[in-house]
Amino acid sequence: MHPFLYYSEHGEVIMKLDYQKAIDYIEQIYSAQDEPKMLDYICRVSRNDFGPTIEDDIARLFKVLIHLTKPKRILEIGTSIGFSTTSMALAAKNYGGKITTLEIDESWAEIAKQIFRREGVSDSIEVVTGDAQDLLPTFPDESFDIVFQDSSKIHYPVMLKDCLRVLKKGGLFLVDDSLFPVLRNEEDWSDSDAKIHEFNKALLDFSVKSTILPIGDGCTVAVKI
């Protein structure tokens, strides 16, 4: 990975910070505090044919944001094995917060429910099975304090308008994998990479203030204004 460069007032490089070294240092600092840890969580799952989960650093960020905003209702699009769901629920339940998580695969929805019971967070989570593109329009306007988008990447642009519609003003829109387009050269982009790039640009046309953080595979944090 490229280093961060620090310059003097004369434009000379005076210090370099290796990005991977910084990540390793942060993980070491917070290792004892992260619970559940992504790898430990995955090891307790009975199947291995699931999609990627968020990383520990993104889970940590989400917990901080939840403790700051104290949301009552969170919508997650894309459950998979429920690592992100569990991480958010552990923080949200301190404030009576509930998570509605959408999962298209019925078998994974059932596995996630079992995991939530095991992790002691099932009372804070409602699992809804179905295609998010069909389910999203059924939710009322401004009915969630946080919306987390982590579904199939090619559907990000399609669902963007509805994601923001169901989000309250002042609410947080969180998006995983925002930096897919920079993981490979543009001529080698997959459909997912191209759709993420389309989504990243389209988000700027809505009434939000946002930024993309270079953690995990990229994480967008936006506030609806």
Image (cartoon, helix red, strand yellow):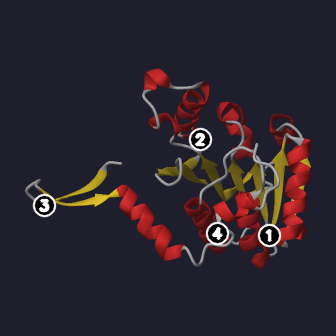
Question: Which residue occupies 72% across, 36% down?
Answer: 159
From mark 2 to mark 1, how far is it between C-alphas?
27 Å
Report the amino acid beneath label 4.
Lys
Q: Quadrant of residue 84?
A: bottom right
Tell me if label 3 and label 4 are in contact, CB under 8 Å.
Answer: no
Question: Mark 1, residues whose alpha carbon is within 10 Å: few (<14), some, or many (≥20)?
Answer: many
Q: Indicate which label's residue lies in the foreground, 1 or 4.
A: 4
Report the amino acid beneath label 2.
Phe
From mark 3 to mark 2, how far is it between C-alphas?
38 Å
Mark sitting on residue 63: 4
Q: Quadrant of residue 18?
A: bottom left
Question: Mark 2, residues whose alpha carbon is within 10 Å: few (<14), some, or many (≥20)?
Answer: few
From mark 3 to mark 4, how far is it between C-alphas?
36 Å
Mark sitting on residue 206: 2
- Residue 153: in sight, yes or no? yes
Report the amino acid beneath label 1.
Gly
Residue 208 in picture, x, y percent from top left = 57, 49
Tell me if label 1 and label 4 are in contact, CB under 8 Å.
Answer: no
Residue under numbered circle 1: 97
Question: Which residue occupies 11% across, 53% down?
Answer: 11
Helix, strand or loop at label 1? It is loop
